[in-house]
């Protein structure tokens, strides 16, 4: 197959590398700034520079771009995309993106499938991408209007390049779950490091500090877009969290050891029931 | 030296194992329930069962007990403890414990030094203890009324058994910093897993979920004691965090991308300045 990867950041770059490492497909790379693309060609992550001609031959187009930028890319280049091509995005938001993409797909004749590879790092860019970033990770797929055959093609590519499982979902479920599993921890990490005691943590910290603060090393441009595009589910999660923090806080303030133990033990049971 | 370890949970057990692995000291173990002590003798983590006689010969007594239980142990056994012995606790709270211990030390004639080894796991008990749990970790020492010679003896034992650094502090600074680096992440983890979406996270989660929720697998008995004993600094941290969460929340609700980007970028700068 001919696979075009547009946007060679950590996600697009890692997908390109994985495709080259684990399959025989031919990979075209496209990127707004030239340096990452040059490095991708040098290291063999992509075979050649992509352009309108490459889009016309593409069996799969992977959009490794910010959500709105991905829509923009398709709007601008839709006329060049092969009508038999399956276009997948990789963005962390689906309700805002899938309907726009479905519309563009029917306008230009290609197939669109919503896609979200569940892995990342607290660093960004092509230089931190790696072929095995998605090893055993979950690949979330929003089928939308795509045929079973098209979905099967993407799912099997995912399994071939190292993903551990495929999860099928709707845009709404995706966004509700991601607000909890991914966006809320990023909000938390940022709020956490604003403590006046944070700059002096060294020598007083171990795994707990490291784990909670890790993703505060955030890509502010990307995540501010994601947070606002997923406003409703995310605010619900933040409010739920604050409510539960208050519950714990008040039992501490009241010195109510029994109530506090009961609350904390409930958290332990949730983790245990999940086998974690 | 003769070293008595009282309380063979993850912390006491790991310290006993480290002393046996890295030094030639003789280790006595004491534990309320017999099984962990039996297993500690079997695997060589301790050389023999401790008792009043062992306490009378001890050069160092390590209290691997919950904070109040450690004070109780010393109150009950103080009369047996060698007057040349250095007693160290291992608990996560210092303002509540050090003054009581200092009083007992002058009453019974031994030396007390506040000690907090900065490592742990989300599991507890002797069976998860390991000799290298403290490898490169920070050892926090509250000198109190101890002589420089006594402090030096504990510090050099720490370096010999694998700790990476010694941090000297006061009970107040210790408790303020630990409220931020350790207690707050535990409060957070518990509040986080109470989200109604938590039980369904599988397939939608990756590192962020794992890291924030890890310590929700909490020892409710121990941490409820620690939280309440450190009420004031911990509530200050929780309130600061909630304030900062609200700041982020409100800029999301207002759809204020510029303000949100500014806030998130500030978090990134804090991490970068810390070299993290």
Image (tube, coloured by chain):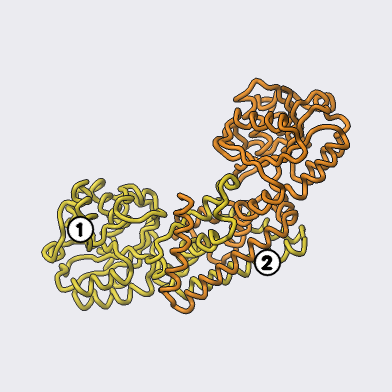
Chain colours: A orange, B yellow
Residue B36 makes an appearance in the image: yes
Specify whether B265 is left or right of A80.
left
The 10 Å Cα crowd at callout 1, few under 14, some 14 to 19, many 20 or more, is: few
* Residue lying furthest top: A24
Q: Are marks 2 and 1 in contact (CB under 8 Å)?
A: no
Rendered residue at 33%/73% (across/down):
B98
Residue A191 x/y as whole percent: 61, 62
Other-residue count near label 2 (Cα within 10 Å), few / some / many at <14 / 14–19 / ≥20: some
Q: Which mark is in front, 2 or 1?
A: 1
The CA span between labels 2 and 1 is 52 Å
If you read the primary sequence from the N terminus, does the residue marked by circle 2 or circle 1 appear first?
A: 1
| Quadrant placement of the N terminus of chain A | top right
Pointer 2 chain: B
- B97 to the left or right of B235: left
**Disc 2 target residue:** B247
Q: Quadrant of residue A49?
A: top right
Q: Which residue is mark 1?
A: B34
């Amino acid at each position: 197959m001919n696979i075009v990867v547009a946007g060679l950041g950590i996600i697009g770059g890692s997908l390109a590398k994985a495709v080259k490492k684990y399959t025989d497909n031919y990979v075209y790379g496209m990127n707004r700034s030239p340096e990452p693309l040059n490095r991708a060609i040098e290291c063999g992550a992509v075979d050649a520079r992509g352009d309108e001609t490459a889009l016309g031959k593409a069996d799969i187009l992977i959009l490794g771009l910010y959500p709105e930028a991905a829509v923009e890319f398709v709007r601008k280049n839709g006329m060049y995309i092969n009508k038999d091509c399956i276009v997948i995005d990789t963005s962390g938001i689906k309700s805002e993106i899938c309907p726009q993409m479905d519309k563009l797909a029917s306008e230009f004749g290609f197939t669109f499938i919503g896609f979200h590879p569940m892995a990342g790092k607290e660093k960004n860019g092509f230089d931190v991408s790696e072929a095995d970033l998605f090893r055993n990770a979950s690949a979330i797929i929003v089928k939308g209007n795509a045929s079973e055959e098209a979905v099967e093609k993407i799912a099997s590519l995912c399994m071939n390049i190292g993903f551990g499982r495929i999860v099928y979902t709707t845009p709404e479920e995706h966004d509700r779950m991601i607000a909890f599993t991914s966006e809320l921890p990023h909000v938390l990490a940022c709020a956490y490091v604003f403590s006046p005691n944070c700059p002096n943590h060294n020598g007083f910290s171990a795994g707990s500090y490291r784990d909670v603060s890790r993703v505060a090393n955030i890509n502010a441009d990307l995540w501010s877009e994601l947070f606002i595009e997923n406003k409703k589910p995310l605010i619900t999660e933040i409010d739920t969290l604050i409510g539960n923090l208050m519950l714990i806080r008040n039992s501490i303030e009241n010195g109510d050891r029994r109530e506090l133990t009961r609350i904390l033990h409930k958290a332990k049971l949730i983790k245990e029931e999940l086998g974690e």
